Image: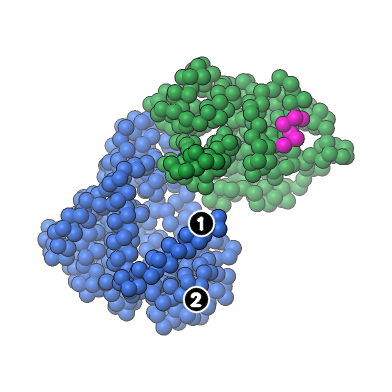
């Protein structure tokens, strides 16, 4: 049986072929889709390509459930943004919706069938205390109540500890920049805010198209450890395809902003894997130009190998290479996030706490 | 082909190998396990359920296995794994079969959104379904077990599925979980009933599963029209009593306890309102199982 993600990647690339799939192929594909959070996307693609005919009814039920879940997540997201808008009524500083919140409000193609209802916002660092107070006054509360967690976020992180609404249970992450200030790359939040664009009819703004792509790339390939795997690549492919088709100078703008915001390395990976797995139409000159952002060959070779293992992992692959690859990506994300003199005490502290918690249990 | 057509050795082999695919109502479950209690429980309780070929599409891929730690040997535990993930902390190995049942309930709850799911038992007579929602300890399963030995068809014990498209109750026909005193009550009430091995010290006390009647399993693809909504309550002293419930109050009472209702959005609201419109709703207290069943039979006669 095929346990790798090939089937899922093929489905994303050629959804019109899905009406020819047999029961066993569906059996694998539905599981891969669920594990990767991409079943909502598959449903949307099939609808667009009218490829539902011939699909077994029990398979259709899973796709229908995925549609219902995705629609609910987006409804929840819109309502949450409405509530945040009300809570921040008196805040005069700009409030930028990031990631999923922006995709949904802009109705970008990337939002189709996407699962996510947590809201991320970016505000100027000087306003963050006011924003936090306003949210707490309107029913949000801290879920990380441990002193060390609170200290850690406030001292070293690029965001407040996550805030959860006491009735709705939804989470809002309030950022003052998009990568940890302790890390290796320092995109200037002032520049992001200055280029942000108002979201018509609301008090919010969204990042400029190139910045939106760069944030997604930074989140996946600099700060993250690809736990979302293929979903990050799908986001990237969608954003790139849509913006390059909508704005004629998008690619030039992207390359220019990548240098300006110090995000050329994560963009290199994002372009590379998006093109490799989903054949995103990256112009040859951009690919050529992005080679300048590539790390030295041992690192680039290793990164290709571990990313490939993690992205193509099937629902219950548990081989050693996969385990090592995941560990390496996790270690890499931490390494890029903090210098050793901060990282080592932090990890020791977390390990000690885990050990104590297990001791109590 | 049915599960009971397999010899015990063949059943064990299939479960330990690539897994066994069987049907329960609209779903196909693929189960992998080499734990003797689960193999035995499945053989006793699911004997009448249709066995499906390996190449069939499965909705739920479930495995129950021992951990690869010391807890495999010392005070052994069991892991419920769904679609390659383990959503729950392990339980003592003795609880493996109840873990399968409650785990499958959870998997259905978290994956299925093309039905409105009510945490309720449901039984059918003359094509009409009585839905019995109630909190644990209210005597819902005892009543259900009693009814299905007196001419009612078992639709479900835990999860009542109402189709968003047809508004019918779609059966699962899975075993009924009897807790504590209910086990003896049903054994005395229906001596011919088959109850699998008791499992002590679970989160709900002692649990034993009752084998669903062959007829209910054979008719598990036959949906029925929702007709009554009855909140049962067992009370050891006192006479049988009942009162009709208002529609609006019943709507909010029912909606409050629904797990996937909010996710369904307006489709869920439309279904629930039209459902409540068509249902006769009662609150019902009983102390004697025989009297309770007679009351249910009268509902059908008066209909």
Mark 1 closeness class: few <14, some 14–19, many ≥20 residues within 10 Å: few
Do marks 2 and 1 share a chain? yes
B246 in relation to A331, above or below: above
Query: Who's the residue at 29% across and 67% down the image?
Result: A336
Element assignment for label 1: helix
Q: Label 1 lies in what chain?
A: A
Instruction: Return the x and y of residue A46 as percentages of the image width and height.
Output: 35, 42
Query: Who's the residue at 44% across and 47% down the image?
Result: A67
Q: Earlier in the sequence, mark 2 or mark 1?
A: 2
Chain B rendered in what hue? green
Q: Which mark is residue A358?
A: 1
> Residue A125: within the magenta?
no
In which quadrant is the C terminus of chain B drawn?
Answer: top right
- Of B255 and B105, nearer the camera is B105
- Residues rendered magenta in the picture: B180-185
Query: Who's the residue at 32% across and 32% down the image?
Result: A1
Question: Can residue A249 be spotted in the picture?
Answer: no
The residue indicated by pointer 2 is A132
Element assignment for label 2: helix
- Quadrant of the rendered structure where residue B136 is? top right
Mark 2 closeness class: few <14, some 14–19, many ≥20 residues within 10 Å: some
Question: Mainly helix, strand or loop, the magenta region?
Answer: helix
- Quadrant of the rendered structure where residue B281 is? top right
């Amino acid at each position: 049986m095929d346990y790798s993600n090939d089937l899922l990647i093929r489905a994303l690339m050629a959804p019109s072929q899905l009406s020819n799939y047999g029961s066993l192929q569906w059996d694998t594909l539905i599981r891969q889709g669920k594990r990767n959070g991409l079943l909502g996307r598959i449903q949307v693609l099939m609808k667009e390509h009218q490829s539902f005919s011939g699909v077994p009814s029990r398979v259709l039920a899973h796709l229908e459930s995925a549609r219902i879940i995705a629609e609910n997540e987006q409804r929840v997201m819109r309502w949450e943004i409405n509530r945040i808008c009300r809570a921040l009524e008196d805040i005069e500083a700009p409030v930028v919706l990031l990631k999923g919140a922006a995709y949904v409000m802009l109705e970008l193609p990337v939002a189709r069938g996407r699962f996510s209802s947590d809201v991320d916002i970016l505000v100027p660092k000087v306003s963050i205390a006011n924003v936090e107070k306003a949210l707490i006054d309107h029913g949000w509360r801290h879920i990380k109540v441990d002193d060390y967690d609170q200290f850690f976020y406030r001292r070293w992180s690029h965001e407040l500890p996550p805030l959860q609404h006491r009735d709705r249970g939804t989470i809002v992450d309030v950022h003052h920049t998009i990568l940890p200030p302790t890390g290796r790359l320092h995109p200037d939040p002032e520049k992001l805010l200055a280029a942000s664009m108002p979201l018509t009819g609301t008090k919010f703004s969204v990042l400029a198209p190139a910045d939106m792509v760069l944030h997604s790339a930074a989140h996946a390939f600099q700060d993250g450890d690809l736990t979302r795997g293929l979903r990050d690549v799908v986001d990237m492919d969608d954003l790139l395809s849509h913006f390059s088709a909508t704005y004629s100078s998008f690619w030039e703008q992207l390359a220019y902003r990548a240098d300006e915001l110090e995000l050329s390395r994560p963009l290199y990976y994002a372009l590379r894997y998006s093109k490799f797995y989903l054949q995103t139409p990256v112009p040859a000159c951009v690919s050529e130009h992005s080679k300048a952002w590539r790390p030295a060959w041992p690192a680039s070779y290793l990164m290709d190998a571990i990313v490939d293992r993690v992205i193509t992992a099937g629902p219950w692959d548990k081989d050693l290479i996969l385990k090592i690859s995941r560990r390496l990506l996790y270690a890499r994300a931490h390494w890029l996030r903090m210098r050793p003199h901060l990282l080592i005490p932090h990890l020791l502290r977390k390990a000690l706490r885990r050990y104590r918690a297990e001791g109590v249990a | 082909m049915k599960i009971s057509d397999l010899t015990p050795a063949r059943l064990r082999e299939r479960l330990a190998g690539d897994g066994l695919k069987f049907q329960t109502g609209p779903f196909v479950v693929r189960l992998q396990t080499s734990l003797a209690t689960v193999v035995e429980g499945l053989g006793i309780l699911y004997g009448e359920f249709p066995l499906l070929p390996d190449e069939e599409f499965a909705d739920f891929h479930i495995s129950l296995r021992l951990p690869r730690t010391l807890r495999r040997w010392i005070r052994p535990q069991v892991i419920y794994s769904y679609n390659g993930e383990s959503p729950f902390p392990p339980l003592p190995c003795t609880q493996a079969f109840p873990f399968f049942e409650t785990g499958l309930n959870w998997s259905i709850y978290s994956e299925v959104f093309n039905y409105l799911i009510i945490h309720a038992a449901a039984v059918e007579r003359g094509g009409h379904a009585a839905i019995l929602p109630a909190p644990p300890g209210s005597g819902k399963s005892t009543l259900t077990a009693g009814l299905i030995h007196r001419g009612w068809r078992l639709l479900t014990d835990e999860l009542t599925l109402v189709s968003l498209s047809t508004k019918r109750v779609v059966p699962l026909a899975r075993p009924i979980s009897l807790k504590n005193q209910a086990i003896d009550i049903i054994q005395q009430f229906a001596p011919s009933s088959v109850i699998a091995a008791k499992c002590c010290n679970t989160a709900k006390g002692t649990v034993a599963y009752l084998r669903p009647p062959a007829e209910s399993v054979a008719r598990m693809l036959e949906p029925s029209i929702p007709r009554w909504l009855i909140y049962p309550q067992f009370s050891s002293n006192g006479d049988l009593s009942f009162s009709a419930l208002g529609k609006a109050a019943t709507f909010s009472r029912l909606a409050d306890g629904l797990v996937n209702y909010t996710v369904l959005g307006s489709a869920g609201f439309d279904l629930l309102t039209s459902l409540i419109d068509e249902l006769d709703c009662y609150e019902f207290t009983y102390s004697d199982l025989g009297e309770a069943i007679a009351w249910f039979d009268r509902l059908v006669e008066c209909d």
